[in-house]
Amino acid sequence: MATSGPPDFGKTNIILKNGYKIPAVGIGTYRVRNYEDMYMLVDGALAAGYRLFDTASVYNNEHWLGAALRTLLPKYELDRRDIFITTKLGPSDHGKDAALKAFTKSLNNLNLGYIDMYLIHFPGASKVDSKSPKNAELRAESWKALEELYSEGKLNAIGVSNYTVKHLEEIISNHSNVPVVNQVEWHPFYYQMDLLDFCRKNSIVMQAYCSFGGTSNGDSSLLEHPLVNCIANNHSISAAQVLLLWALQQGIMVIPKSTKSEHIHQNIQLQDRLSSNEIELLFDLGLQPKIAWDPTSIK
């Protein structure tokens, strides 16, 4: 691995449209389903230098994340101001009143004083047909709730997740606050350049999940792809680091998740840079079906 050259992405902050700083690299907590695993993840992450932790109400683990951080921050001589916490409004909590209640519940679950960034997790509402105009009505009310929380100083940043260009255009046309982040699936097997272009033009920072493809579903075909591993060997880094650099060099933040200590440390060691040719080769691997929630049918 290079010992000099460009700054380490793992130590880089991104300035959001509202001036708030967010680490370019964080750690996800999807499918961390008990306190012991969460404690190990947080302990390893803090030791490795992670300062952004991503959770969601639908993960049902906010309380474990908060408890682990309250216990472990003193061990690393850190306090609440040194970390960035993101959580998300679930599809069952769309609507202004429901969203305000859901935020309070997440705040209490985490029990860390405040939440840095709150995202609407999905543009569709639970138990509402994807083609129903009710989805648009409910997510507009949800966004109003987030705007209210932000204006009252209860949040440092508000954004969305899994939003398409159409859904983003709705917000921009009808609300005074534009999302500062759109968290979406993004990897060489699935990406949307039109969405990235739109976000760039509107100062919305993209944040990638599923950076390694379908590993959360037991599919390691992207991590094991010969081209990914050829590039990794050329740089003496891991296949996972190649995929994270591919996104970061496009200006896209990442939140890789792992519970293995070795991988937690590797995934934030990102001093290398891929060549423009290597980046293009990864773009050309061939698009495959989307792995996670698909918002394209949501009216």
Image (spheres, rainbow, N blue to C red):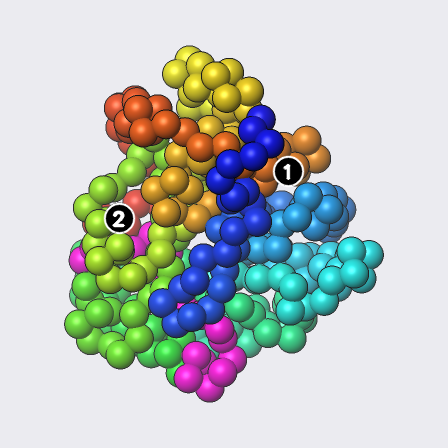
Give the image location of residue 243, x and y in percent. Answer: 44, 31
Say which amino acid is labelled 1.
Answer: Ile
Let me know if residue 260 is in the magenta part.
Answer: no
Residue positioned most to the right = 75
Quadrant of the snapshot with the C terminus: bottom left
Q: Which residues are magenta?
A: 149-166
The picture quadrant where one finds residue 129 is bottom left
Residue positioned most to the front = 4
Quadrant of the snapshot with the N terminus: top right
Residue drawn at (22%, 49%) of the image = 197
Residue drawn at (55%, 76%) of the image = 104
Residue positioned most to the bottom = 152
Q: Which mark is residue 69?
A: none
The picture quadrant where one finds residue 127 is bottom left
Q: Residues within 10 Å of mark 1 (few under 14, many from 20)?
A: many
Nearest the viewer among 238 and 95 is: 238
Nearest the viewer among 13 and 227 is: 13
Residue 134 seen anywhere in this rendered image of the structure: no
Query: Label 2, on which residue?
Result: 196
Give the image location of residue 292, x and y in percent. Answer: 38, 41
Say which amino acid is labelled 2.
Answer: Leu
180 shown above or below 9: below
Q: Is 205 displayed left or right of 74 in the figure? A: left
Residue drawn at (56%, 34%) of the image = 4
Give the image location of residue 77, x and y in percent. Answer: 79, 61
Q: Which mark is residue 264?
A: 1
Give the image location of residue 250, x and y in percent. Answer: 34, 42
Disc 1 element:
helix
Q: Is 110 displayed left or right of 214 in the figure? A: right
Disc 2 element:
helix
109 shown above or below 209: below
